[in-house]
Amino acid sequence: MEEYDNVVVTTGGYRGPAKAGHDETGDLFEGLDIEIVPPVPSLFTFNLPSSPVRDLMGTVVENASVSLAGTKFKAAGPLLITHWGMSGPAVLKLSSYAARYLAESRYDATLLVNWLGGKDLDSVRSGLQRTAVKNPLRQVSNSRPEEIPSRLWTYLVTKSKVREDARWAEIGPKGINRLAESLSNDSYHIKGQSRFKEEFVTCGGVALSNINNKTLECVKHPGLYFAGEVLDIDAITGGFNLQAAWSTGFLVADSISRKDNKD
């Protein structure tokens, strides 16, 4: 067996020990007494099977707010409707925040969408009431909030049980309330992981308690270093995970160089 002064582990997302029947390498850290945070997927899109919203694929809302019902997980940003469900920065960030919760829930959860970003139900209702007062004879389907694409507005009007040819004066307070609810608290059933298994990063890996955070050297095994996604570090979309990989790689290289120079 060959021996080395330093070993750097940069294997990417750590999946844990191999499972019986799978063609995978064994546990890299077996016998080393290294704490591993169980890995789960992070940064993925949401699969909404059978939801009619998927017919609006390609539709983008620039400032939506998304959350998971019954939790405090919430994110905001652009949202993209796809032919399998929902994607875009808002959804990817939410999947990162709630990665472990969604894994424990077997990717069965309720997604709540506020199509108007930070506007609450009362504000949305008030805005619709003002529109109704100013345009009583105008068709509801032709009087959409400027933030909402026309195809999405038509979909939300229908979902709110308002006729497309109905005029504002005809739908009354109940119709306005249903529209406000659809705009600010639209509900969808998430079922299953991303359709194409295209999760971008892994949440979990080598616990940070194992390493010296100034050098990324293993506390229990001097000369063993970790860098990149094999560590229990992950972030939201926007290049942060790439930056983490580059930064930890640089830190490890710098640490080894400094140690060798001392020797």
Image (tube, helix red, strand yellow):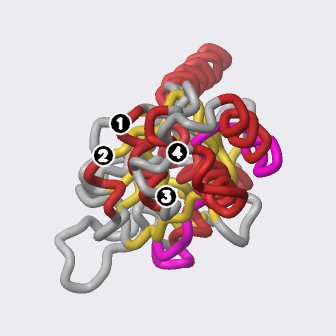
The picture quadrant where one finds residue 191 is: bottom left
Is residue 111 left or right of 200 when viewed as pictured? right
Q: Earlier in the sequence, mark 3 or mark 2?
A: 2
Inter-mark Cα distance, 3 to 1:
21 Å
Q: Earlier in the sequence, mark 3 or mark 1?
A: 1
Inter-mark Cα distance, 4 to 2:
24 Å
Q: Residue furthest bottom?
A: 20
Magenta range is: 104-124
Is residue 174 left or right of 171 when viewed as pictured? right
Image x and y of residue 85, in percent = 35, 55
Residue 10 visible, this angle: no
Mark 4: secondary structure? loop
Q: Nearer the viewer, mark 4 or mark 2?
A: 4
Going 26% across and 52% down the picture, which residue do you hit? 55
Report if residue 110 lies within the magenta region: yes
Q: Which residue is mark 1?
A: 59
